[in-house]
Amino acid sequence: MKTQSKSKKSLVAVGVLAAITLGWLGTTYTISNSVEQRLGNYVETLNQQVQSEDLFFVKPKFILKEVNSSFFKSDFIISVEIENFKKFIETQKLKSRKATSNAEFSEEYFKEEEARIKALPDFIKLFDVKNIATHGPFPKITEFNFTPGVMSIDSVTTYNDLNAEVKNFTKSLKLDDKTLASIENHQVFSANTMIPYSKSISTTLQASPFDWTINNTVIKYEGLNLTFNGAADFDLNIKSGKIGLTDLPSREGYESEEAFKKALAQVEENFTLNGLTFVQKRQSGDITTGSINLSFEPIQFKALSSETDENQKPLWNTLSFEGLDVNYERSKNDGLTFNEKANLIIKPATFNAVEYDYWNDGTKVITGNSSVVEMVADSKSIPNGFLLAGRESYKADFKLIREALSTGDLEVLIKLNNWTSIAKTIELYRQLAGTSTAAIKPFEINVKEESSDPVDLNIKLGEISTTFSRESTDTSKPLVLSAKLNSLDAKETNKNFHISLKDYSLSSTIPLQNFYPFNIDYSIGNTSFNIENRNIFTTDNMRVALGLVENEKSVDIKQHFSGKNILVNSVDFGSFELNENLENFNKESFNQLQDVFIESLKLALSNQDLFTPPQDIFIENLMAKAPASLEGLLSNGLIFNKSPNTFSSKAGKTDLSLVVKLKPITNQSIAEASSSIDSAVALIENLNFSLDADINYLADTGAKFQLLAFSGGETPEAEMIDSTRMQFAGMIPQMISSSPAASIINVTEDKLSSKIEVKDGKITVNGQEMTPDEILGLLGL
């Protein structure tokens, strides 16, 4: 019984082994019989993907040919072609010739040329890829790799697989015999592609190293390795070896062979990239996820200096970076928005230059270095629609360029003009929301020059940051932007030059539907410029603010300018604040004028006429339609508000204020106002003007301005400023008292003051009622 049981088990084992073997052979047989069809499907799918991709200026095409299949293996060739640029260029030349032709070219000539160009191939061959495919179900079993798959394809391209034009070009170069032989026997790349039963495809590729001398330039390349996994998670990894370029001297430039060999011995590599790595990952079919990492190994540039050392050995100018890293990551949130993070690191750099100093007939040596420069960016909750709209915008631009290339009609590029770009940008940013921050971290640069006029410069830059935010993609929601420079400190030791900047900032609210609400606020923090230990300019703060403000029935334009503790050439000019507003524009008419502006802009942006500038269309439409809205713009009664305006220093201060409220203005009232002074005053609903000035402040400021104007850049002595101020303080009251202005300006021992009021058609000057004609008479007008 035991013997019988063992026999049964043996039979089962043999049966299983036979089934596996038959299944394996059956699968291999099925694959071998359908290789050409399968490969044809793969190539057809690849061509469809390439042709549907809009981010190509010039598109390649792949052709399957010479398929030979056996039971376990198949060999075939894929020819890589590219769109024929020559045909594009010939088409454009003929079109231009037709447009400018006279009797020089006959109709028959153009017909023959059109036929000749039409006969040119649409695609030209670049190179062939020779392939050997090992059939499944376990195509890599000989490598003890039991990954199942349809086939494993080993590919190779050599110099002989390149097109004839490349070969002819190679022979036209100045090559030595060794380089020519190396090129002709060079394997451009080799690759292995695994085609599994799933849709994912994985590829490994190696670009072969080489060491060639072409036209007196030595090119050394250590090769490249690429791996690609086309599974659900796209994964591309590229690692390149060292790249080096060396310019060799020409024999013709040397009198003897010995001198030439000596020059060759002193040659150094002009450019060196010690390698790079590129890694990209993303989820296939989802542009809202993925990452990119790019890393450059140390980079060096070298150029021969015009100078030599004491032994007549050539000196070299160099620039080197320890490397560069770029990291980018994109991740999805809720399916509607995504986040982005980016980081750029430029590793420390150094440079050295030795050159002839023409001005001083000597040699100057310039050296420098920089610390790590790091840039970071972080964006959150950005709508997917913004990303897709941006992608579609790029596709549209690429499509226009392709259209110009393929048809030879360069006039289609008129659609890429600046005005069109403005419109596209506005539409794109209407789909933007979320928050985004970016910053350049603090870094330092040092530069030294050894010469008859030495330089020792140090620059320290504090953090620079920018922030963007927008509540939603609702067109009524504005963009809110801000930027800040924490500090900048630049010192030059030999010339005692020093610049210090702190707390510079810019903020703005930008509407994407109307002109309002809009504001921009620029602030300059602590600032000082010094040369040779002498102050040129210093301020604690300067600020400029502009705004367009919406009210219930009106729109206001507001402006603000201010400065604190301002010193020029160490002379104290104190502080100032200026406000100048135009208020109470009729909101309905303002909106109508805004609509005319937008309509004119759209007409200009849609212009397709190559010979009519878009700005001409814009101005013509604006001038034709804007006047109808201008009259209503002032129908609320415009307010001109110039207050408060203050100037102050240690010597005193001056306050100036002017507020004018006009009655509703029409074209008729403007015409009447121009007929007489009384009619002009009648347009004023009320006016209030006030002046309160310390004579000592006016004298001090006037003295300082005069002394600086004639100082030749030198700082006036304190005694000279005091003396001149006292002279001015005595002159100012006398000048006012002896001029027509004395009728409207009160002068006391230490003050100038004035109050003017207009109300209900009556004018009051310093409490005394006057007519317009009386005021003009007092002023000698």
Image: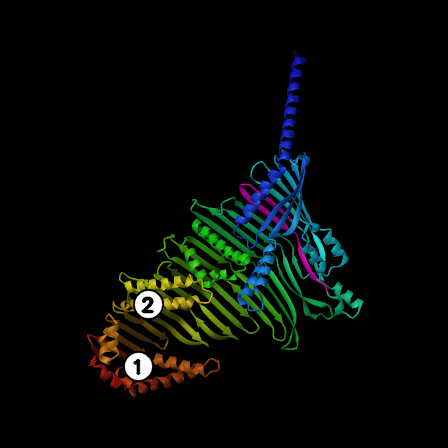
Q: Please tell me the numbered disc located at residue 750.
A: 1
Q: Nearer the viewer, mark 1 or mark 2?
A: 2
Callout 2 environment at 10 Å: few (<14), some (14 to 19), or many (20+)? some
Which residue carries the number 2 mark? 626
Image location (x, y in percent) of residue 642: 31, 72
Image x and y of residue 215, in percent: 71, 62
Amino acid type at mark 1: Asp
**Would residue 698 appear left or right of 662 to someone viewing this image?**
right
Which quarter of the figure is the N terminus placed in? top right
Q: Is residue 25 magenta?
A: no
Whether 355 is drawn above or below 441: the answer is below
Q: Position of residue 614 (x, y in %)?
A: 43, 66
Q: CA distance from mark 1 to mark 2?
A: 51 Å
Which image quadrant: the C terminus?
bottom left
User: Between residues 478 and 607, which one lies in front from this camera angle?
Assistant: 607
Which mark is first along the chain, 2 or 1? 2
In the rendered image, residue 233 lying in the magenta stretch gets the answer yes
Q: Is residue 726 left or right of residue 712?
A: left
Give the residue displayed 77% in from the left and 57% down from the top. 177
- Disc 2 residue type? Ala
Q: Position of residue 183 (x, y in %)?
A: 72, 54
Q: Quadrant of residue 456?
A: bottom right
Secondary structure at badge 2 equals loop
Residue numbers of the magenta segment? 225-248
